Amino acid sequence: MQTILGLYRKVSALDTEAVIESAIVQTKEVIADLNAEQMNKGLRADGSEITPSYSPLTIAIKEEKGQPTDRVTLKDTGDYYKAIRVEVSSGGETKVINNDPKAEKLNKKYSKAKGNILGLSDPYRREYLNDHLRPTFSKNIEEAIGLKLK
């Protein structure tokens, strides 16, 4: 059984920054998945539509493949989506990157002044925070102090 003094010592010694960083590292794949889902809906990190629209040739190719043509999804084979990575630096700072060979070309065409295609818009960010990061953070705190949180 844990005493109040023992609990106080655990809480006082808790490195919350490290716990937060750990929770982000544990859930960073979710950020990548949500970013791919967001792009598949034709949205940039700021929530705006990905533009410019596909060319008539690309639309014809996508129709032949049975892929969406009513929005820019940046998805053909899925390789670009699979190459989305999240880097977590000290302090929990995150950066969404893509190391696919097409990344530079796609970012140049669909990002920059128009808004970045990598990153989460507000609805996706809230989903990540509420459904993934917060529960993981709470679980990590519970494990660190040995007390169930509500």
Image (cartoon, rainbow, N blue to C red):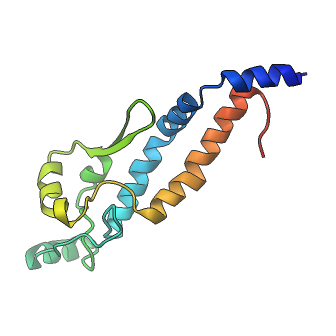
Residue in front for this viewpoint, 58 or 74:
74
Q: What is the count of numbered marks?
A: 0
Q: Is residue 84 visible?
A: no
Q: Position of residue 140 (x, y in %)?
A: 64, 33
- Residue drawn at (20%, 66%) of the image: 114
- Residue drawn at (24%, 71%) of the image: 72
Q: Is residue 21 above or below residue 71?
A: above
- Residue drawn at (12%, 62%) of the image: 109
Horizontal side, residue 123 vs residue 46: left or right: right
Q: Where is residue 111 in the image (x, y as percent from the top left)?
A: 20, 60
Q: Quadrant of the N terminus?
A: top right
Q: Where is residue 43 in the image (x, y as percent from the top left)?
A: 32, 68
When asked about the image quadrant of residue 14, the answer is top right
- Residue drawn at (61%, 41%) of the image: 136
Residue in front for this viewpoint, 134 or 15:
15
Horizontal side, residue 131 vs residue 41: left or right: right
